[in-house]
């Protein structure tokens, strides 16, 4: 069964399209064309497009799947496999975020601190060094602005990731609950 994950999963209001696609790629890597959670979800989607209520959609999809030897536990187990794939992406994202913060924020902070030390050193020197102090002070101001801008962008990306991730995670968990409730 060919499955279009972008059509299968809902994009929330705060979903970041590029992050959404990255997370869906992680899910797609786990798909192996067997009838599993994704196939089950696709069947439910197809049935709901026929104006079938949610509970009936779940039951009908399961009835069809069970003729293929699919069990409720198999569907739940495969849904959890996709949650694990999502969690792996969250871990990778957290590591990348940590590295970005270290290089773009903390690295700039260290650079600013080093420049401040140089300024103190030059303040003790004679008039000739006053030009150098002014140049370094301007550099520090630029570093602070760049640091604040980088941190703001990184935190905004983190928030978009969390919103997108939460949307997908909640949808899968809701489907698991429906599977447990309706089947």
Image: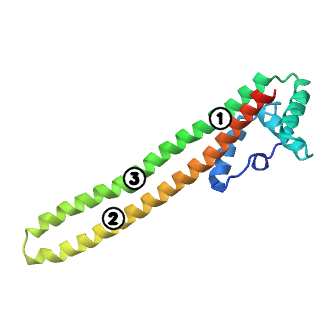
Give the label on residue 14, or none: none
Q: Are marks 2 and 1 in contact (CB under 8 Å)?
A: no
Q: Name the residue: 78% across, 46% down.
A: 8
Return the residue at label 3. 103
Query: In the displayed structure, would residue 168 be above or below residue 114?
Result: above
Q: Secondary structure at mark 2?
A: helix
Density class for disc 1 (Cα within 10 Å; few <14, some 14-19, many ≥20) is some
- Give the Cα separation between the discs numbered 2 and 1: 39 Å
Q: Position of residue 167 (x, y in %)?
A: 65, 46
Q: Which dot, 3 or 2, sits closer to the camera?
A: 2
- Toward which corner of the image does residue 37 lie, by quadrant? top right
Considering the image in quadrants, where does the C terminus appear?
Answer: top right
Q: Name the residue: 91% across, 46% down.
A: 51
Return the residue at label 1. 83
Q: Position of residue 82 (x, y in %)?
A: 68, 35
Return the residue at label 2. 144
Q: Are marks 3 and 2 in contact (CB under 8 Å)?
A: no
Density class for disc 2 (Cα within 10 Å; few <14, some 14-19, many ≥20) is some
> Which one is in front, 24 or 180?
180
Q: Name the residue: 68% across, 50% down.
A: 21
């Amino acid at each position: 069964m060919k499955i279009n994950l972008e059509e299968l999963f809902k994009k929330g209001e705060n979903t970041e399209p590029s992050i959404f696609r990255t997370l869906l790629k992680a899910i797609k890597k786990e798909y192996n064309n067997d009838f599993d959670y994704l196939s089950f979800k696709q069947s439910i989607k197809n049935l709901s497009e026929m104006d079938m209520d949610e509970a009936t959609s779940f039951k009908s999809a399961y009835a069809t799947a069970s003729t293929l030897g699919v069990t409720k536990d198999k569907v739940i187990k495969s849904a959890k496999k996709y949650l694990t794939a999502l969690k792996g992406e969250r871990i990778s994202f957290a590591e990348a975020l940590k590295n970005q913060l270290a290089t773009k924020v903390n690295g700039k902070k260290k650079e600013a601190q080093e420049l401040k030390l140089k300024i103190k050193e030059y303040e003790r020197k004679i008039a000739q060094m006053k030009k150098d102090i002014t140049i370094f002070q301007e550099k520090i101001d630029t570093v602070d602005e760049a640091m604040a801008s980088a941190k703001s962008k990184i935190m905004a990306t983190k928030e978009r990731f969390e919103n997108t991730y939460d949307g997908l995670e909640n949808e899968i968990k809701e489907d698991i609950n429906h599977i447990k409730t309706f089947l």
